[in-house]
Image: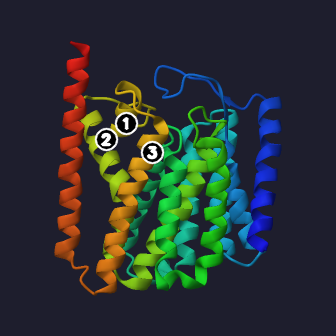
């Protein structure tokens, strides 16, 4: 019953936010880099940090993680309303990562590992933030990760938290996974969710000792990394919004449904995660297998990207 009540509460909060966003003109206007063509309410992802706050009051999550998510969520929401300079945004990310490390007692572990984890965490937060380009991709990918973490026995004590965050994804999805989205997550949604997922990734790897679970983020991770490499090669500013991800080419230039492309990304990632969980249950998730999966996904991605570009060139001709 508590989860039914949570769904009703979250839907109510989202509808109230829509009224506020509409009144104060918190909207996303399409531009040359946008994948949408009509004005859409921005910041519907505010439901994610709110769900995390509810989880804290219900005793599902520590104050450190609640504060980390609320911190980046608040700064990002302000940025959604009125763009901020890079300093306050980056500072909030640094403080949030510090709180995550504190919660996981990483400051008492091998200190040489912290700079590596810091760079990876900051990179993940920013990569996930740029994912909010087509309808459904952010929330479906987040939901895929949450479901995958929930299937691991090591995370059984955290199931109430994962379920609550999963419900927030379902509620947001009601208004975003559409041909014409009612709302976008905005930075408040994508960045706060990125911090939450990054926390769970580090937590899961530490508690299981299985580095292979980092592949839970592999499908989008490969897309993000290769896209950054290509943009650097083309001497583009990688910190500026763009339409260079494979899923953006498929949705925009190829004309595939945004929702279909989002479901394809989520389905492939869910299949990969299922294989990882199964192999680990059989104690066969070796580094050799992990590298094999990563290389296979990378080659498949490059092949699909090449096929898409060839088709785009033929269409231009």
Q: In which quarter of the image is residue 278?
A: bottom left
User: Which circle marks residue 228 in the picture?
Assistant: 2
User: From what the image shows, is residue 285 above or below residue 123?
Assistant: below
Residue 96 at x, y percent in the picture: 58, 61
Marks 1 and 3: which is nearer the front? 3
Q: In which quarter of the image is residue 65?
A: bottom right
Which residue, given by chain and number where applicable, does mark 3 sit on? 262
Which residue, given by chain and number where applicable, does mark 1 sit on? 238
Q: What element carries label 1?
A: loop
The answer for how far apart the CA atoms under marks 2 and 3 are is: 20 Å
106 or 131, which is in the foreground?
Answer: 131
Q: Going from the N terminus, do you reach mark 2 or mark 3 first?
A: 2
Q: Quadrant of residue 175?
A: top right
Q: In which quarter of the image is the N terminus?
A: bottom right
Query: Is residue 232 left or right of 193 when viewed as pictured?
Result: left
Q: Give the class, few, some or many, for how many residues have Cα within 10 Å of label 1's Cα (few <14, many ≥20).
A: few
Q: Are marks 2 and 1 in contact (CB under 8 Å)?
A: yes
User: From what the image shows, is residue 37 above or below residue 239?
Assistant: above
Colour setup of the view: rainbow
Residue 167 at x, y percent in the picture: 66, 62
Marks 2 and 3: which is nearer the front? 3
Q: Give the class, few, some or many, for how many residues have Cα within 10 Å of label 3's Cα (few <14, many ≥20).
A: many
The answer for how far apart the CA atoms under marks 2 and 1 are is: 6 Å
């Amino acid at each position: 019953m508590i989860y039914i009540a949570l769904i009703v509460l979250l839907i109510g909060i989202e509808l109230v936010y829509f009224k506020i966003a509409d009144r104060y003109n918190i909207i996303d206007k399409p531009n040359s880099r946008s994948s949408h063509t009509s004005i859409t309410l921005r910041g519907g992802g505010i439901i994610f940090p709110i769900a995390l706050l509810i989880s804290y009051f219900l005793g599902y999550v520590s104050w450190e993680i609640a504060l980390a998510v609320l911190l980046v969520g608040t700064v990002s929401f302000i940025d959604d309303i009125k763009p901020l300079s890079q300093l306050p945004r980056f500072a909030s990310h640094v403080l949030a990562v510090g709180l995550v490390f504190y919660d996981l007692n990483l400051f008492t572990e091998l200190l040489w590992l912290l700079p590596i984890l810091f760079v990876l965490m900051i990179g993940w937060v920013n990569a996930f933030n740029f994912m909010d380009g087509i309808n459904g991709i952010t929330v479906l990918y987040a939901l895929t990760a949450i479901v995958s973490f929930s299937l691991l026995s090591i995370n059984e004590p955290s199931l109430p938290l994962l379920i609550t965050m999963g419900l927030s994804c379902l509620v947001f999805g009601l208004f975003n996974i559409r041909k014409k989205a009612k709302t976008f997550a905005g930075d408040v949604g994508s960045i706060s969710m990125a911090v939450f997922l990054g926390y769970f990734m580090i937590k899961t790897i530490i508690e299981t000792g299985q580095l292979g679970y980092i592949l839970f983020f592999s499908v989008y991770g490969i897309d993000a990394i290769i896209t950054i490499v290509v943009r650097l090669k083309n001497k583009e500013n990688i910190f500026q919004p763009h339409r260079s991800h494979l899923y953006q080419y498929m949705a925009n230039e190829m004309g595939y449904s945004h929702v279909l492309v989002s479901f394809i990304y989520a389905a492939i990632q869910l299949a990969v995660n299922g294989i990882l969980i199964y192999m680990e249950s059989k104690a066969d998730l070796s580094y050799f297998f992990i590298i094999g999966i990563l290389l296979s996904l990378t080659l498949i991605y490059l092949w699909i990207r090449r096929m898409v570009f060839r088709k785009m060139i033929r269409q231009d001709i």
